[in-house]
Image (cartoon, rainbow, N blue to C red):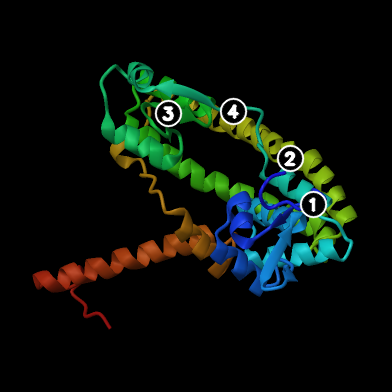
Amino acid sequence: MTAGQSTQSVAEYRIEDLAQRSGATVRTIRAYQDRGLLPKPERRGRSNVYGAAHLARLRQIADLLDRGYTLASIKELLEAWDAGRGLGGVLGLVAEVQGPWSDEEAARITRAELDARFGGEPDEEAVAEAIELGVLEPVPGRDDEFLVPSPQELAVAVELYAAGVPLSAISGHLRELRGQVEHIASRFLEFTTEHVFARYLGHRPPTDADATEAAALVRRLRPLAQQTVDAELARAMRMFATRHLQQHLRPDGPPPMASSPRTVTLPAETIRAVQRLVGDEDTAAFIAAAAEREVKARTLDTLTATGHGPPDGRQQA
């Protein structure tokens, strides 16, 4: 017979024992009780006694917190479960959404292997930027080894570097691409939520049956976003690559580089803010108008500072 168990082999714990078994602190357990997340213990004389149900509930709460739920939403889920609606479907839906959205498996790479793939010379700044972008993840306790969440993404960077693209340009391109892809992902989720998943989200939390059905739909629809992007990217690449090649093969040659417009990357948050303000269709026009207005304002400021008036000599209102 172990400490904390009765002669009938029914698990019973003091709050300190429960904290040790669950990994929660005594203070956390009491806070959960106050918020109604944890049933009250049984009173035995001057002592509070907790049982296996309390331990199971604490482990459930910890699992839901790891999945990203807030304590308020956890309380709703647990109340639904206590009312007999079940948590299996909801947890299955959460697992389906939070699971891998690609068949690609993460790999590991040593620092020596990494340096060898990129010219053989250590580049601390490039490694730091790769970590910031999530292309590399440090392995705890191993300063000479990294986790590579997407070996394909790293392989692309290696090929681009071998073709002569500087590492700074590769990381800049990835930042720009990531913002655009995140916008596509957000739009796809809005689209599917409106037309497919809205009927499952009317209950908070959804019923067990609705959550199970929604999880099955996630499995069916998951590859559609990537398939659509792959098809549209192939179409666009063929169109623009053909146009680009024809432009550079024409008799008079490509236009001078100085006359080519320069692409400017805006932060993704700035683009999203403009989209919320004017809508998707007017975003580009709004940004162009704002830039033109700023250029004109700065031109006037410069002319005023140098003592010169406008080119035609007229006064500005």
The residue under label 4 is 238
Residue 263 location (% of width, % of height): 39, 45
Asked if one can make out residue 204 in the rendered structure from this viewpoint, the answer is no
Q: Which is nearer the N-term, disc 2 or disc 3?
A: 3
- Give the amino acid at mark 1: Val
The residue under label 1 is 10
- Give the amino acid at mark 3: Phe
Residue 152 location (% of width, % of height): 53, 25
Nearest to viewer (mark 2 / mark 4) = 2
Q: Are marks 2 and 3 in contact (CB under 8 Å)?
A: no
For this orientation, the residue located farthest to the bottom is 317
As measured in the structure, the alpha-carbon distance from the residue carrying label 1 to the one carrying label 2 is 45 Å
Residue 99 location (% of width, % of height): 68, 40
> Which residue is rendered at x = 57% and y = 31% of the image?
237
* Helix, strand or loop under label 4: helix
| Numbered badge on residue 222 | 2
Q: Which is nearer the N-term, disc 3 or disc 4?
A: 3
> Which residue is rendered at x = 66% and y = 28% of the image?
103
Up/down of 198 relative to 221, above or below? below
Q: Which is nearer the N-term, disc 1 or disc 2?
A: 1
As measured in the structure, the alpha-carbon distance from the residue carrying label 4 to the one carrying label 1 is 69 Å
> How busy is the neighbourhood of tag 1: few (under 14 within 10 Å), some, or many (20 plus)?
few
> How busy is the neighbourhood of tag 4: few (under 14 within 10 Å), some, or many (20 plus)?
few
